[in-house]
Image (spheres, rainbow, N blue to C red):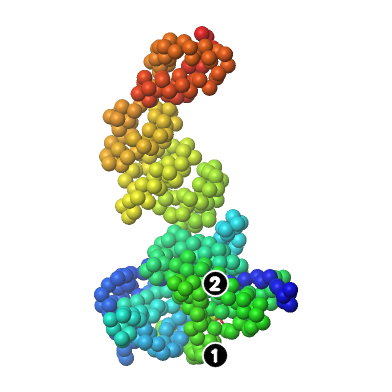
């Protein structure tokens, strides 16, 4: 028997998310922010803080920060200033970073997140502030030196800090997905984690179940995919529990996650951390957000992803599942709503978009979707009025329309000769001839073998080249058999 009384632990997680803003120029200089340019081609004297240069605030970046704050119901600071955070690092050409220490643009806030258990939980934010990015250190195997690319230095970032309210790796992943979706809806960032537009530091601690006193936190830096965030947090929770169970103490430190080994490793302890000597940035004046400007930004706010989910369920009567899939990307949600202006069969539109439209887009990424909303609505209408079956519409007409989006759906259906025969006067003689040819089967039906109707149906379909309206044909066959 073990001498230990094993304790269950509750993880406590707080995230710091860096969001690269989609402004075309940097936060305090006119340099381009285009990703992937030749190293050190987007670096002005201002970015390098050469003597005599002065930073100039990018108004668009402030607007984007306010947008994010409004979306998260943060308190928007009507007057704020920037601070200098002083430290030496090779990728920091100025020797300091301009950030916001005491007066973030946005204070507090909440993000409603649908957690893995399906329940929506409001993740409370501590703050959202503006700051500039650092450059990039490049370590290539053929060089023993470190190469420096300052193109990214000075690019506008939003840093969003949550309260320590997240309780599992999966919740952290769900939160990040929601943030990525939100910044894309707002159009303030491409949210592209592979290109570093969204980066996350995860603060992790564990405490005995039922406790209200948080344990010692450890910070895991620079996670650049949602999968890595989840893996790193899981690994760190496990490491801390193992330590505590072995009677060891958790040190306050910064760690890095290694995706290859699946472990976190110590980078530096807090004692080694710099004293940043923050002070208000003397080269920038305080920023005032006027009532007018705030009202203008508020007016331009789009519907938010979670508002759209609600609307898709309440207004369009869609199942929650559909609403979630259709609101994954703003373009998809917009398309759905546009198609719904031309038809009131909303569920059918949803099925079309979640099915054939999405799979076309997945197979042809980056091409956009060629069918106008009007055209898709027409296709929905053809099925609704029984002129074609859904399978014919999606497998035959849809691909043809994509090749020729200038034709109407009806034209393509006629050209392919797939319009369903829903004229009883045409179908009935075919049914009669089928029943005539199979007297034996008719007898079996009469003796109670009702399933045989499928065989008659198959034969009718064969003789009409699949064009008989199945509902009408079934009805007519049944009637004919009852009358025999
Ligand atoms: P620091 O002063 O070390 O920067 P902060 O209080 O500013 O710490 O918090 C930084 C981040 O760490 C926030 O996201 C916060 O939610 C999170 N955090 C704070 N305390 C804990 C804890 N005990 N366990 C996990 N995360 C925590
Ligand atoms: Mg802090």
Residue that label 2 marks = 235
Residue 447 lies, in percent from the top left, at: 57, 13
- How many numbered discs, if any? 2
Residue 15 lies, in percent from the top left, at: 53, 72
Q: CA distance from mark 1 to mark 2?
A: 24 Å
Q: Secondary structure at mark 2?
A: helix
* Residue drawn at point x = 64 percent, y = 83 percent: 248
In the image, 30 versus 427, the foreground residue is: 427
Q: What is the quadrant of the N terminus in the image?
A: bottom right
Residue 473 lies, in percent from the top left, at: 45, 20
In the image, 452 versus 129, the foreground residue is: 452
* Residue drawn at point x = 34 percent, y = 28 percent: 418
* Circle 1 crowding by C-alpha within 10 Å: few under 14, some 14–19, many from 20: few
* Circle 2 crowding by C-alpha within 10 Å: few under 14, some 14–19, many from 20: some
Residue at the far front: name it.
1
Residue that label 1 marks = 271
* Residue drawn at point x = 44 percent, y = 89 percent: 87
In the image, 283 versus 470, the foreground residue is: 470
**Taking 304 as reference, is 58 above or below it?**
below
Question: Residue 91: which quarter of the image?
Answer: bottom left
């Amino acid at each position: 028997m073990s001498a230990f009384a094993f304790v269950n632990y509750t993880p406590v997680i707080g995230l710091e998310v860096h969001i690269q803003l989609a402004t075309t120029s940097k936060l305090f200089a006119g340099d381009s922010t285009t990703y992937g340019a030749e190293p050190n081609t987007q670096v002005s004297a201002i970015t390098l803080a050469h003597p005599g240069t002065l930073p100039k605030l990018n108004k668009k970046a402030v607007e984007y920060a306010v947008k994010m704050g409004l979306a998260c119901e943060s308190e928007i600071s009507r007057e704020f200033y920037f601070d200098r955070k002083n430290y030496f690092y090779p990728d920091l050409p100025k020797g300091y970073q301009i950030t916001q220490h005491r007066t973030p643009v946005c204070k507090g806030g909440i993000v409603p997140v649908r957690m893995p258990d399906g329940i929506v939980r409001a993740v409370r934010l501590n703050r959202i502030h503006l700051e500039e990015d650092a450059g990039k250190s490049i370590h290539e195997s053929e060089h023993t030196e470190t190469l420096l690319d300052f193109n990214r230095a000075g690019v506008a970032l939003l840093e969003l800090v949550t309260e320590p309210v997240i309780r599992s790796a999966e919740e952290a992943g769900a939160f990040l997905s929601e943030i990525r979706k939100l910044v894309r809806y707002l159009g303030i960032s491409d949210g592209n984690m592979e290109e570093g537009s969204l980066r996350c530091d995860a603060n992790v601690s564990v405490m005995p179940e039922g406790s209200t006193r948080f344990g010692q936190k450890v910070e895991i830096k620079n996670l650049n995919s949602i999968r890595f965030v989840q893996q790193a947090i899981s690994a760190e929770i496990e490491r801390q529990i193992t330590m505590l169970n072995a009677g060891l103490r958790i040190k306050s430190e910064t760690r890095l996650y290694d995706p290859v080994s699946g472990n976190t490793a110590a980078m530096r302890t807090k004692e080694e951390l710099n004293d940043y000597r923050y002070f208000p940035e003397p080269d920038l004046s305080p920023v005032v957000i006027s009532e007018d400007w705030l009202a203008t930004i508020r007016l331009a706010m789009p519907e938010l992803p979670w508002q759209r989910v609600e609307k898709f369920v309440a207004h369009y009567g869609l199942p929650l599942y559909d609403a979630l899939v259709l609101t994954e990307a703003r373009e998809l949600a917009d398309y759905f709503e546009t198609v719904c202006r031309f038809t009131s069969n909303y569920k059918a539109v949803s099925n079309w978009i979640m099915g054939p439209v999405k799979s076309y887009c997945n197979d042809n990424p980056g091409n956009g979707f060629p069918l106008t909303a009007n055209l898709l609505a027409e296709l929905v209408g053809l099925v609704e009025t029984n002129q074609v079956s859904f399978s014919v519409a999606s497998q035959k007409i849809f691909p043809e329309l994509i090749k020729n989006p200038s034709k109407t759906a009806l034209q393509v259906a006629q050209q392919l000769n797939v319009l369903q025969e829903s004229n009883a006067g045409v179908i009935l003689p075919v049914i009669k001839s089928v029943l005539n040819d199979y007297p034996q089967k008719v007898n079996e039906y009469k003796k109670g073998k009702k399933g045989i109707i499928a065989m008659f149906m198959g034969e009718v379909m064969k003789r009409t080249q699949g064009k008989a309206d199945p509902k009408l044909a079934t009805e007519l066959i049944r009637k004919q058999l009852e009358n025999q």
